[in-house]
Image: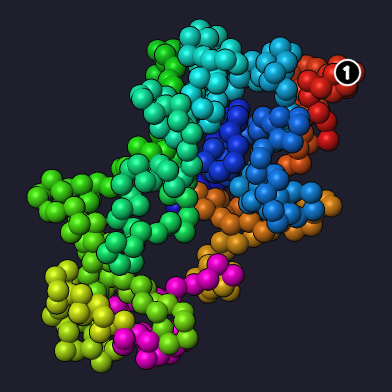
Amino acid sequence: MRRHLNRPLAGVRVVDLTRLLPGPFATVLLGDLGADVIKIEDPRGGDYARLYQPFIGPMGSFFAGINRNKRSVTLNLKEPEGLGLLADLIADADVLIESFRPGVMERLGFGAERLEADFPGVIVCSISGYGQTGPARLEAGHDLNYIARAGLVYGTGRDPGELVVPGFQVADIAGGALYAVSSILAALLERGRSGDDWEGVWLDISMTEGALAFMLPMISLLSAGSPVEEAARGMLNGGWACYGVYETQDGRHMALGALEAKFWLAFCEAAGFEARQTDGHRSDAVGLEVKRELAELFRTRTQAGWIDALAGVDCCCVPVRRPDELEDDPLFIDRDIFFTLDKPALGPLKQTATPLTPADRAWFRPPPHLGEHTREILGELGRTSEQIEEMAERGVVSVA
């Protein structure tokens, strides 16, 4: 039997200049794979996510969920000495990942020319809203702005004309963090193959372009001549009755994904909807009428009633779970998705595994306090305890 991955990135050092969500989500994945992630934070508060309520002791729960397996060192990057320490850390790193607005790295003295000249072996990854080049490179934005610019918001709505904000950060996580990790892993592979011929690489990850890539199926419909309104309300966007979310009698919901004819037929037979077994894959006026009738049908039973009625029926219909129900789902229990990491003064911190999280988590570190590892990491750079204390007194670093 093949074994699961366990610390394949052991020995890889990542200097992490990111904060909030996209970058930290990327580096938690790298940390789960065994990389030594050194999280650089400002001594005056650190990652903004530390301050987001609700708190677990002094730590924001948002921060606690996406910063395990990292070591925190505080550096004041407005001080030359802090920048010097950063240079020392980069020199010993395999990967540098940052999520500043384009131009900030240059102002810090770590622009492309210096990184190429002084740190040619380091893989540099920049995550930004609109990319390192182009007319929008300096524009501020957040996930909603990026997915709107990429066209995703237009195709996200329960009914024609009703646009909604997605329930998770599509561009931040899928368009930014996951592409960053994929690119970094590919670059590590290329570097290993290239040997002495390695010339370095700067990965330019645009969250907007990452989100735009998810539009490929819809763009293909437009290329085939479909009107934009039809493409935005097609088979995967709520245009077909067989693929949608329906409210139940008790105000809960069921998600029906019976795209293939065999699943739709099985659903219609189990639900007593045989009269419409040939009409579930239409987006015309008849299709809209089928959706209306199906919505009425789903409101005749509670969510639990539908679960019972469809038990054992292979029709791709599942309950819409609330977030507070996930830990009790037998699927996630059996696959050991939720676990805890204990930290003094905080107690058990709830964590969620990802598809990259190894089964063996005995070596996992809980999320760090601000500057928790400053002494440790600067000691690895050869600084003495006296030097570290003196730098802390001058505000170059802070120590926990």
Q: Count all numbered tags in the image, as a single digit.
A: 1
Q: Is residue 313 magenta?
A: yes
Residue where numbered disc 1 is placed: 390
Q: Position of residue 50 (x, y in %)?
A: 70, 44
Of 226 and 195, the residue lying toward us = 226
- Which residue is drawn at the image coordinates 55% and 25% (left, top)? 96
Q: Is residue 46 visible?
A: yes
- Which residue is drawn at the image coordinates 52% and 53% (left, top)? 354
Q: Is residue 243 above or below residue 44?
A: below
Please name the amino acid that badge 1 sits on.
Glu
Q: Position of residue 339 (x, y in %)?
A: 64, 60
Q: Residues within 10 Å of mark 1 (few under 14, many from 20)?
A: few
Relative side of 390 to 175, left or right: right
Res 56 → quadrant: bottom right
Q: Where does the N terminus fall, quadrant-wise? A: bottom left
Relative side of 249 to 345, left or right: left
Relative side of 88 to 124, left or right: right
Q: Is residue 53 above or below residue 265?
A: above
- Which residue is drawn at the image coordinates 31% and 87% (left, top)? 297
Q: Is residue 203 visible?
A: no
Q: Is residue 351 magenta?
A: no
Q: Is residue 357 above or below residue 20?
A: below
- Which region is colored magenta? 296-324
Q: Position of residue 4 (x, y in %)?
A: 50, 51
- Which residue is drawn at the image coordinates 31% and 81% (left, top)? 295
Q: Residue furthest left?
A: 225
Q: Position of residue 12 (x, y in %)?
A: 57, 30
Mark 1, secondary structure of its residue: helix
Relative side of 107 to 290, left or right: right
Q: How is the image coloured?
A: rainbow
Q: Where does the C terminus fall, quadrant-wise? A: top right
Of 114 and 103, the residue lying toward us = 103
